Image (cartoon, grey):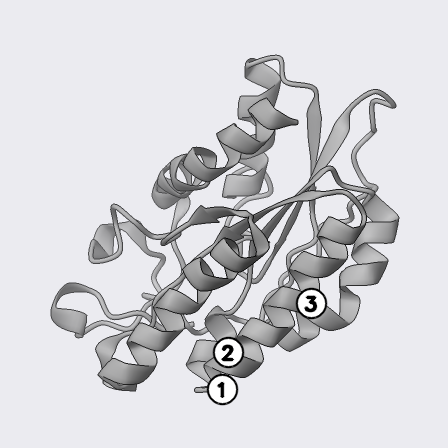
Amino acid sequence: MEFMLRGWRLSVLLVLALGAPLADANSKGKNAAADTILVYGDSVSAAYGLGPREGWPTLLEERLRARKLNYIVANASISGETSAGGAARIDAALARTKPSIVIVALGANDGLRGLPVAQMKTNLARIVGAAQARGAKVLIVGMRVPPNYGREYSQEFFTAFSELAHVRHTGYVPFLFEGFAERRDYYQDDNMHPNARAQPIMLDNVWRGLEPLLRRN
């Protein structure tokens, strides 16, 4: 995905490299009494270009452990994933991980390709509906596209996430990159993917939407 830094001059977020490894949701030893949080996103959530312990989903698991909250994190994020790809594999991911909470962080690659926002919303609604049908709570994580995609498209894209969260009664994070989007020093050398320094900020953004779900759960 591509995002524009200061003055929207530097593209950074909407290009999601292919090939980052999928975290195996069953690779961590599970405590039978622990609930699972499924992270369902693209390369940003797959920690593209980072060490195995640096991505925000790993930091989330560490925070949960430090606060003695009985959850494990299953990261089923894939680099280059679109909302359509996520919708196609959601049933298998849910069956494999049996999550109590699903964090949906998809849609940015749809924006990169200029795909119809209505199509993206339909795909995301399919993901949310599948999770809710299994009794999972859902947190939708929003994203932005730069103004050069056109003001109307950019606004429609941004509001799609909040509209879906409202209709489906989910948790909502307006913007994953809130707090550093225009800071060049928070991105890797490709000027596209957040670096290790940015991961705790993304975690804090997600946490604000996730913590109420943890309390209710």
What whole-number distance in Å separates the C-alpha atoms at marks 3 and 1? 17 Å
Element under label 1?
A: loop
Left or right relative to 12: residue 90: right
The first of marks 2 and 3 along the sequence is: 2
The first of marks 3 and 1 along the sequence is: 1
Percent coordinates x, y for residue 94 in the rendering? 80, 52
Residue at far front of view = 167
The first of marks 2 and 1 along the sequence is: 2
Residue at far left of view = 7
Q: Residues within 10 Å of mark 1 (few under 14, many from 20)?
A: some
Residue at 50 percent across and 75 percent down: it is 109
Q: Which residue is mark 2?
A: 110
What whole-number distance in Å separates the C-alpha atoms at marks 2 and 1? 5 Å
Percent coordinates x, y for residue 1 in the rendering? 43, 72
* Image quarter of residue 99: top right
Percent coordinates x, y for residue 39 in the rendering? 63, 48
What whole-number distance in Å separates the C-alpha atoms at marks 2 and 3? 15 Å
Q: Nearer the viewer, residue 62 or 163?
A: 163
The answer to whether marks 2 and 1 mark residues whose Cβ atoms lie closer than 8 Å is yes
Disc marking residue 126: 3
Q: Residues within 10 Å of mark 3 (few under 14, many from 20)?
A: some
Q: Residues within 10 Å of mark 2 (few under 14, many from 20)?
A: many
In the image, what residue type sits under mark 1?
A: Leu
Disc marking residue 115: 1
Left or right relative to 213: residue 12: left
Residue at 55 percent across and 14 percent down: it is 67
In the image, what residue type sits under mark 3?
A: Arg
